[in-house]
Image: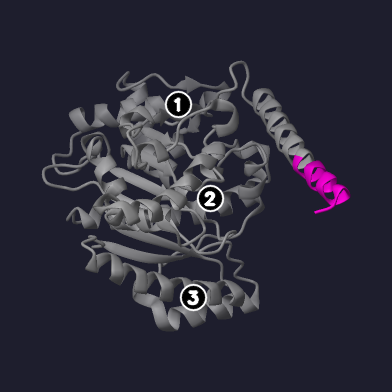
Amino acid sequence: MNAVAAQTKVGFDDTILAQGREISRRLNQLRIENFPPDAKKTLRQFSLAEAAYFLGVSTSNLKKLHLEGKGVEPTVHAGGRRSYSAEQIRELRRWLDQNGRSEVKKYVPSRRGNEKLQVIAVVNFKGGSGKTTTAAHLGQHLALTGHRVLSIDLDPQASLSALYGIQPELDHYLSIYEAIRYDDSRAPISTLIRPTNFPDLDIVPASLELQEYEYDTPLAMQKGNEGKLFFNRIVNALDEVDARYDVVVLDCPPQLGYLTLTALSAATSVLITVHPQMLDLMSMSQFLLMLGDIIKTVKQAGGDVDLDWFRYLITRYEPTDLPQAQMVGFMQSMLTPQMLKNEMLKSTAISDAGLTKQTLYEVERSAMNRATYDRAMESMEAVNSEIRELIHEAWGRIK
């Protein structure tokens, strides 16, 4: 390499490092501006109708509780409008569970008896399929409806972590890598868990260090059985916190590597996100072919890939787009039993909320076009409610 070429290479390295640091600095500045004074995410209040929906009661019954001085004291706005914090919704749920008139209905849906921890792996071979958006909203929906949820970000790009208010390169939080690494520095997963701004929703953030697992595993496989049994590492890590949670949501990286395979071995259910376009469907076809062959190999090696359910979720769907509608019909002709009945619609409400690192559950409805927001939220809730029902069915609960 001549001196000019070497100088050019060094210059490129220095440039991208400087740009990476500057982007992180600016993003952190935006975060501090959006979430003052301590740069931590807060959470909006929920309307009477929203609180009633998440609790599974009527708005009239919830209003009656307040008028009778029972439960919690909501914030009362001008005109008598009531709103509740997420913490108050949780307190109301517990109050209803203890004092509700129904002896059949349970307002706290946590695991009971021999019901096992549900571990949902959200996967796709191709980026841009709405995987992280799906995982983020699913975790928040389950928490708001009374489930104890742990989200684990397995993508080194850490998009889920960022959406939940954590910027790994600045916050210096440790990732799940610390619980699944192969050396003596392995740490209990309980030391890696961080709370979010939603009650009953915790997260194990991601970081670029997670990529090391992809390099460490083949080396460990050459050294002995620990590496050859890599697929048990997340399962073993979760054993420590099994009793603390009802559901674990794994946001997998957009590649079929050791992280994804380890996640699938830990999963009790799998959600495959797919954007209804030809190239995405072709990519998914290759993903399924490779995944099926690899899972067979993992099973032969002693891995336990035994799912309660798996489903395909259509994401970023535009029903008025004829090619997309045709692609959905094409999928339904082959995959109907495994397709969710509801699709996640493409919406500017979701992307607009993401500009400030917020989800639909966090952003104020008044901050955007209300019809757009309502349409997006209706779609999101239909999908998440369907998944919640699958979780309860896996527990053997009858509607």
Check disc 2 and report the residue beneath it: 133
* Residue 176 visible, this orientation: no
Residue type beneath disc 2: Thr
Q: Residue at x 55, y 33 (%)?
A: 168
Q: Which residues are magenta?
A: 1-13
Give the foreground label among 2 and 3.
Answer: 3
Q: Which mark is residue 304?
A: none
In the image, 372 versus 78, the foreground residue is 372
Is residue 259 left or right of 266 when viewed as pictured? right
Check disc 3 and report the residue beneath it: 286
Cα distance, mark 2 to mark 1?
Answer: 23 Å
Is residue 161 left or right of 39 when viewed as pictured? left
Q: Secondary structure at mark 3?
A: helix
Q: Secondary structure at mark 2?
A: helix
Q: Is residue 260 magenta?
A: no
Q: Secondary structure at mark 1?
A: loop
Place residue 389 in its image quadrant: bottom left
x%, y% of residue 233? Answer: 30, 47
Check disc 1 and report the residue beneath it: 85
x%, y% of residue 324? Answer: 60, 74
Quick one: label 2, few (<14), some, or many (20+) residues within 10 Å?
many
Residue type beneath disc 3: Gln
x%, y% of residue 305? Answer: 26, 62
Q: Residue at x 42, y 36 (%)?
A: 203
In the image, 189 versus 352, the foreground residue is 189
Circles 2 and 1 in contact, beta carbons < 8 Å:
no
Cα distance, mark 2 to mark 3?
Answer: 23 Å
Place residue 338 in its image quadrant: bottom left
